[in-house]
Amino acid sequence: MTAPLLQVRDLKTWFPIKRGIFARTTGYVRAVDGVTFAVQAGETVGLVGESGCGKTTLGRTLMGLEPRRAGEIHFGGTPLWPRRHSASLPFRRRIQMIFQDPFSSLNPRLTVLDIITEGLLEHGLIRPRERTEAGVRLLQEVGMDPDVLHRYPHEFSGGQRQRLSIARAMALRPDLVICDEPVSALDVSVRAQVLNLLIDLGAAHRLSYLFISHDLGVIRHICSRVIVMYLGVVVESGPTSGIIDHPVHPYTRALVSAVPVPFGSGRQRVILSGEVPSAANPPSGCRFHTRCPYAMPDCSRIAPPLERFQPSTGAAREVACLRKHELA
Amino acid sequence: MNSNPPLLDIQNLSVAFDTDEGPLTAVENVSFSIARGEVLGLVGESGCGKSVTALSLLRLIPMPPGRIQSGKVVFDNRDLLRLPASELQPIRGGQISMIFQEPASALSPLHRVGAQLMETLRLHQAIDRPAAWATSVEWLRKVGIPDPEQRMQAYPYELSGGMLQRVMIAMALMTRPELIIADEPTTALDVTIQAQVLQLLRDMRTQSTALLLITHDLGVVWEMCDRVLVMYASQIVEEGPRSELFHRPCHPYTRALLGSVISLTGSAERLVTIDGQVPSPLSYPRGCRFAPRCPYAFDRCRAGQPPLESIAPQRRSACFMASAFAQGGDMP
Ligand SMILES: Nc1ncnc2c1ncn2[C@@H]1O[C@H](COP(=O)(O)OP(=O)(O)OP(=O)(O)O)[C@@H](O)[C@H]1O
Ligand SMILES: Nc1ncnc2c1ncn2[C@@H]1O[C@H](COP(=O)(O)OP(=O)(O)OP(=O)(O)O)[C@@H](O)[C@H]1O
Ligand SMILES: [Mg+2]
Ligand SMILES: [Mg+2]
């Protein structure tokens, strides 16, 4: 296999907790706490996990928007961030992010035309007089009416704004697009249109996606591999259908069992008990042990490594669980 | 359910925005009601007017450019659209609370989340600061925020998308309102936390709190709602009890919507979408607004709009073919 497009090794991003009038650092929120994975060119990798487990922070760190505390990021073989701004400009084009909140990620003072063609101008990919033409093409690509070009973000519904963010990200023809919940604000039909669009653009331009979503149906549909995070670390990763059909890690099991489906009959749900632990003070040993229905005494002492594992049913994968052999 | 007067009764609500290109119809002639303790789902295409409907009930749309053109919103024998601002203020966040689709509408970026929670509580309840602190912490814990005492001190930007959404949910529930309007309350939540939050919303029903739930997640609608309203292009096109509506949709848009659900067991086939584009709210077609995309449309559909009519007890549909759908077979 050729070198991956993106290789991340033992990445950590911590946020200082500052308290008191002197803003003394009293501890750290360990949002991302030792994450390793790779994305191949043209591959779509899903990233799922509990709310607050560090997915957005991971994406922002890959974009160079958060300083990392430790670890390495290689993009196309080149180490990324920190580097001088001028040297990083090409990378800023090649990695794009579609942000989770379509409301605050669009500048309210710019028109649609400005928003979606700004990057093209900045990177010298079009001339100023080609702006309108480029804007119309981009809007058509995301299924929006070209006559909205001169309107402002606040005039659009949540779903419409998310399409504008997609148009903006795609404009620069990046190699890697980090999609943070790109379709959760969309109705199912528009969602399907946008996903088909992302798939088509991906195939046409050999794009890679790191696709953050809470919707396992969507993840299953578009991602060949999935990474499951819990409290700053990866607990399971591997082929999407293999993991969704036969989850091994107890957190993944709970996640898969909780998906609400229309016409759903009462499936057996794993309801997680116990308080959600804090990323400022993660539990010892396995971070999931405080809520895990299968935890045993060793789980609170030993942090299980993420290891390759072949369960008796389902695909080979990586799992971080001491009891994986019994559970599989 | 229908013998008592409804908790909230909306009649002929129409809302427009003045734009550079002319007036934009966001909500047109919308009528529905919610009973005490009922969970009513509101679904429909992006941009069809769900949020504007919800915001208009409490007169929260920006005016101008927004205009509430007509309608009545009767709550507690009072028309909220005509109430003096001083009487509407205590209802907002007190008897009726709102979980906004846009976090910025509910939370100020400049203040710590704890201060904002306490302020909401103290605005609607006579409690002192220590009690307000304790109640706020308890609610953050209920919505699954880790380390709630510590998080009281956090600014909104220090929280993840899903945590912010849960802070808003806590803020909306903790005043124990009679009606909660929840606009996409769980989009940023993973399914395990979502299940926990939905359970909290269900628990509110035991105190006969009603819920208007706007969501794109039809799985959540299925799990939560008693009744469902479907909007398309600024109008209500269908209404019915949940199971009947899901099993026997009587409007082609609802049928198409249910047909586009992405299943968890799905294969790698192309996702089903509804062909064509939503008409622009600046220039809706004369006939049925779904006709240009409807596989069943015939001449009459393009000539005039089908009225929203009762087709069975508790069921309404705006389609000339509705009775045929109602008698036809169930969805596969
Ligand atoms: N302030 C505004 N100025 C002009 N138009 C507006 C404004 N707010 C909303 N609109 C328009 O009103 C229509 C309805 O918007 P609304 O936000 O209610 O949609 P929605 O059904 O909630 O969609 P979504 O599911 O995407 O959130 C849209 O066409 C939108 O562009
Ligand atoms: N700027 C910041 N300052 C301090 N803490 C932060 C900051 N940004 C994120 N955090 C914390 O880092 C942790 C991870 O947050 P992140 O936004 O990455 O989660 P997430 O997995 O994207 O969650 P969600 O699914 O809810 O969006 C959370 O505990 C959050 O409070
Ligand atoms: Mg996030
Ligand atoms: Mg909305």
Image: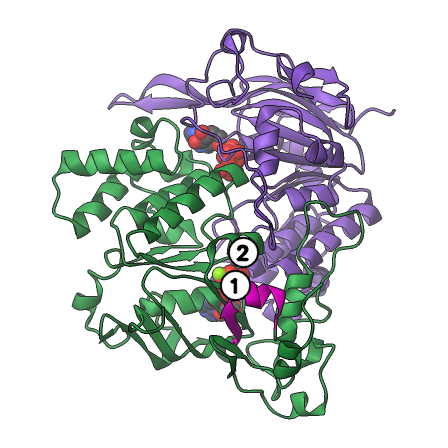
The percent coordinates of residue B274 (x first, y second) are 70, 67
Q: Which chain is purple?
A: A
Q: For the view shown, which residue lies furthest in the right direction?
A: A1
Residue toward you, A132 or B182: B182
C-beta proximity under 8 Å, tags 2 and 1:
yes
Q: Looking at numbered disc 1 in the image, what kind of residue is underneath it?
A: Arg
The structure residue drawn at horizontal position 66% and vertical position 48%, both measured from the top left corner, is: A169
Residue toward you, B26 or A244: A244
The structure residue drawn at horizontal position 45% and vertical position 51%, both measured from the top left corner, is: B185
The answer to whether one can see residue B44 in this image is: no
Residue toward you, B176 or A170: B176
- Height in image: B298 above or below A153? below
The percent coordinates of residue B304 (x first, y second) are 61, 91
- Residue B305 lies within the magenta run: no
User: How packed is label 2: few (under 14 Cα within 10 Å), some, or many (20 or more)?
Assistant: many
Say which quarter of the image contains residue A115. bottom right
**Residue at which label 1 appears:** B242
The percent coordinates of residue B241 (x first, y second) are 50, 67
Q: Which residues are magenta?
A: B236-249
Quadrant for the N terminus of chain A in the image: top right
The answer to whether one can see residue A101 in this image is: yes
**Residue at which label 2 appears:** B222
**What's the colour of chain B in the image?**
green
